[in-house]
Image (cartoon, rainbow, N blue to C red):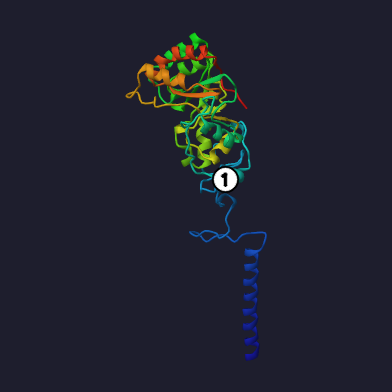
Amino acid sequence: MKFLKTALILSAMLAMVALTGCTACNNTGSSSIAPSVPGTTSSIPSVSSVPPVTSSEGSVLPSKPGTSSSSHSETTSSMIPTLSTDFSEIGALDGKQVTWGPGRHKDESNRPTDCIGLQEKYGKHNAYFIGNEKGKIYLTFDEGYENGYTSKILDVLKDKKVPAVFFVTKHYAKTNPELIQRMIDEGHVVGNHSDKHPNFTTLPLDAAQNDIMSLHNYMKETYNYDMSLFRYPEGAFSEQTLALVGKMGYKQLFWSFAYNDWDPEKQPATEDAYKRIVDAAHDGAIYLLHAVSSANTAALPNAIDTLRSNGFEFALFNEG
């Protein structure tokens, strides 16, 4: 009797061990994941929690068109004209800001040699520091805010039959609809100068893309206008940003002439502005002028006449 009681106890214990083992197998089998205890986190990450791919500089790369990420959920393939999906290639490029400028050195044709070198180095990314067309000059104006001179500049361009590119920010486009519409109606190009005018080399690439597309989409929705030219605020770029913006389908327009004309409180004399503009002329010149400048506005009519008499033709930029 004592022996039978002991046997029954041992049988019950063995049954409990077997039951426990089966439960563990069911919870950890290959077809299912054991549920986390409330207040804890499973050691197996879900797809949405996998860290985003980062660039060589530590910035977050944008998701592929048609996908979403925490910082790029609004971008879809329908919003982007053209965009490479090989962001690992872009992220492998140098993200450091490039220090550059037209410089003082000129060749025998008065073309800035620094711009020629930059064109040779970065032209593969749809970037333009100087044009190739002999005898052509490209006028461009940057518009961060309106200072009362743009309508006068447009009057001069209309009178002289000169086309130009006006690079505008989103704020400018939203607060000056009549001027934007006039630029379009009179045959000028409205270029993308960003939404918030940031230094693009300080942004994650997905944020840079979003900023550009914000203005791009606004212009399309408001004016039914497709932007195709982009200019970096402050001219600040890296090879990473060049690759990104180039693959978005934009031509990136820099400049081969600029001067200190952006401060309304420190404007040069009209004659000085005229001389700077005329003396800098060269084949394929990309002029950057700020439309807030009273000196540029006053000097523009005579400068156009002089440059034409010297054999130059004004054209809209459309190279490459």
Q: Can residue 271 be seen by looking at this rendering?
A: yes
Q: In the displayed structure, does residue 189 sit left or right of residue 18? A: left
> Depth check: 240 or 216 in front?
240
Q: Amino acid at mark 1?
A: Gly
Seen as rendered, the residue at the extreme left is 265
> Quarter holding the C terminus?
top right
The image shows residue 144 at horizontal and vertical percentages of 42, 26
What's the residue at 35%, 21% (across, down)?
268
> Depth check: 103 or 76 in front?
103
Q: Can residue 247 be seen by looking at this rendering?
A: no
The image shows residue 237 at horizontal and vertical percentages of 50, 37
Seen as rendered, the residue at the extreme right is 31
Seen as rendered, the residue at the extreme front is 108
Q: Secondary structure at mark 1?
A: helix
Q: Residues within 10 Å of mark 1 (few under 14, many from 20)?
A: many
Q: Is residue 2 above or below residue 289?
A: below
What's the residue at 44%, 15% (across, down)?
300
What's the residue at 52%, 44% (across, down)?
95
The image shows residue 294 at horizontal and vertical percentages of 37, 18
The image shows residue 154 at horizontal and vertical percentages of 46, 14
Q: In the displayed structure, does residue 111 sit left or right of residue 148? A: right
Seen as rendered, the residue at the extreme top is 159
> Quarter holding the N terminus?
bottom right
> Depth check: 96 or 17 in front?
96
Residue 302, by quadrant, is top left
Q: Which residue is mark 1?
A: 91
> Depth check: 110 or 184 in front?
110
